Image (cartoon, rainbow, N blue to C red):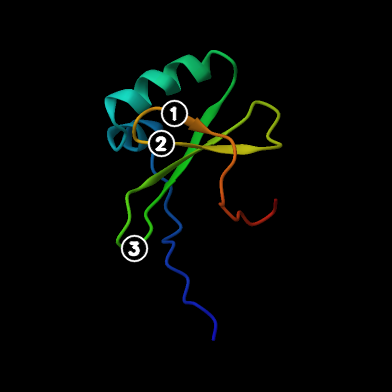
Amino acid sequence: MAQAERRTGTHKSGRALRAELSEAQLDTLAQLERYGWELKFIRHPLFQDPVAVLMDPDRKDCAVLARDGVLQAQHRLRLRGH
């Protein structure tokens, strides 16, 4: 059975995305942005904490930024188009 699409088609601004991050995540993000990393989106899985997803400068790989500010390059995210 196909799952219904939950995305609304609207994209949040960078400021709106940052408002959802913890202080530790914001600190790590600021450091990573110096090297070209970008906060792409935040997933909101049901009954779980939000998941901040960053994209590398070459747009070849992504990583998860945990609530404690640790970058997790090894993750179990499945992204369309990758």
Q: Which residue is mark 2?
A: 66
* Residue drawn at point x = 53 percent, y = 13 percent: 34
User: On the picture, is 82 further left or further right than 28?
Assistant: right
- The first of marks 2 and 3 along the sequence is 3
Instruction: Give, as a three-letter code, the residue at label 2.
Output: Ala
Callout 3 secondary element: loop
Question: Which percent across, then down, holds residue 53?
Answer: 49, 40
- The first of marks 3 and 1 along the sequence is 3
* Residue drawn at point x = 46 percent, y = 43 percent: 41
User: On the picture, is 11 further left or further right than 21?
Assistant: right
Question: CB of mark 2 within 8 Å of CB of mark 1?
Answer: yes
Q: Which residue is mark 3?
A: 46
Q: Is residue 6 placed above or below 12 in the rendered structure? A: below
Q: Is residue 77 placed above or below 61 in the rendered structure? A: below
Q: Is residue 4 placed above or below 67 in the rendered structure? A: below
Q: Which residue is mark 1?
A: 70
Q: Residues within 10 Å of mark 3 (few under 14, many from 20)?
A: few
Question: Which percent across, then down, holds residue 50?
Answer: 35, 48
Which mark lies nearer to you, 2 or 3? Answer: 2
Instruction: Give, as a three-letter code, the residue at label 3.
Output: Leu
* Residue drawn at point x = 32 percent, y = 33 percent: 21
